[in-house]
Image (cartoon, grey):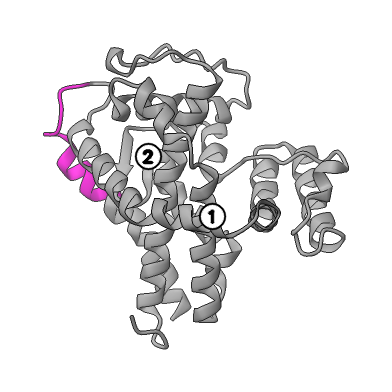
Amino acid sequence: MRNVFRSSRAGVAAAALSAVLLTGCATTANPNDPLEGFNRAMFSFNDQVDKAVVKPAAQVYEAVLPSPVRTGVGNVFGNLGDPWIALNNMLQGKFAEGMSDLMRFALNSTWGLLGLLDIASEAGLPKHDEDLGQTLGRWGVGEGAYIVLPFFGPRTVRDTMALPADFMANEPFSIDHVATRNTVLGTRIVHGRSVLLGADHTLEEAALDRYAFVRDFYLEQRRYKVDDGRRERVYEDFDEQSAAPLGDEVDAAATAAVERLELVGIGELALERAAASPTHKN
């Protein structure tokens, strides 16, 4: 059953991508965003899902749990991601960074009480942010068209193709015990969204066109990450409709908008996995 489900997960992004490509030719005349009509519809849909489900849960989570507890939860999830980050660093030829990530994982998993404490950062081992999409970019794979996937949020064709592997490599998704898995996944979604609370209002005021602003920011952000910061985030390709006074506050707000839509995808994946399990009925 696990193999069947993993195959279905791998097919989610592929099916979504195929649907987008099939409908994209008639969606817009904008050469810089050939799928704009479809993308705007999906952006609005994801935004409504976030407002109706994910954000309210995150607000309750933040109100109920004290800050130290939430920090510990975030540390645990960050620790679980370090091995995959390490692998991608090594695949990009950054072996020193990859070894640092592995040392982070070992240190936090032991002395850090299974990742509750981020003592690795205190020890001078910085947290990195790498995924397969960035690795493919470093290998010269073109980013392709910008796509907003239902539930999974902003992507490019390259990032969409990397999405199944990024999810399969995330340890909580391999938990077999249904109740434990659903609890972990639910907590992950809600915690991640809670970190982004407070940035929404800034983005609403900053951008004339939220869709265009998030699109342009996402593309610049991904290119910046692929180039490991060697490329300045100058936003030279921003649409006039997305014009906003750029600065740390708006930058953080745009990051929040991108990431919160990605978080919704984790919830859909959890529901799919639960539905596929013969031992769980909803």
Percent x, y of residue 263? 44, 50
For label 2, the SS is strand
Q: Quadrant of the C terminus?
A: bottom left
Q: Picture quarter containing residue 72?
A: bottom right
- Which amino acid type is shown beneath numbered disc 1? Ala
According to the picture, the residue beneath numbered tag 1 turns out to be: 63
Q: Is residue 65 left or right of residue 122?
A: left
- Which amino acid type is shown beneath numbered disc 2? Pro
Of 266 and 138, nearer the camera is 266
Percent x, y of residue 181? 53, 73
Q: Picture quarter containing residue 212?
A: top left
Percent x, y of residue 4? 40, 75
Residue at screen point 57% across, 66% down: 172
According to the picture, the residue beneath numbered tag 2 turns out to be: 154
Residue at screen point 28% across, 24% down: 209
Name, please, the residue furthest toward the bottom: 279
Choose mark 2 or mark 1, whichever is in front.
Answer: 1
Residue at screen point 33% across, 54% down: 14
Q: Earlier in the sequence, mark 2 or mark 1?
A: 1
Q: Is residue 193 left or right of residue 281?
A: right
Which residues make up the magenta segment? 17-30
Name, please, the residue furthest toward the left: 26
Q: Is residue 259 above or below residue 279?
A: above
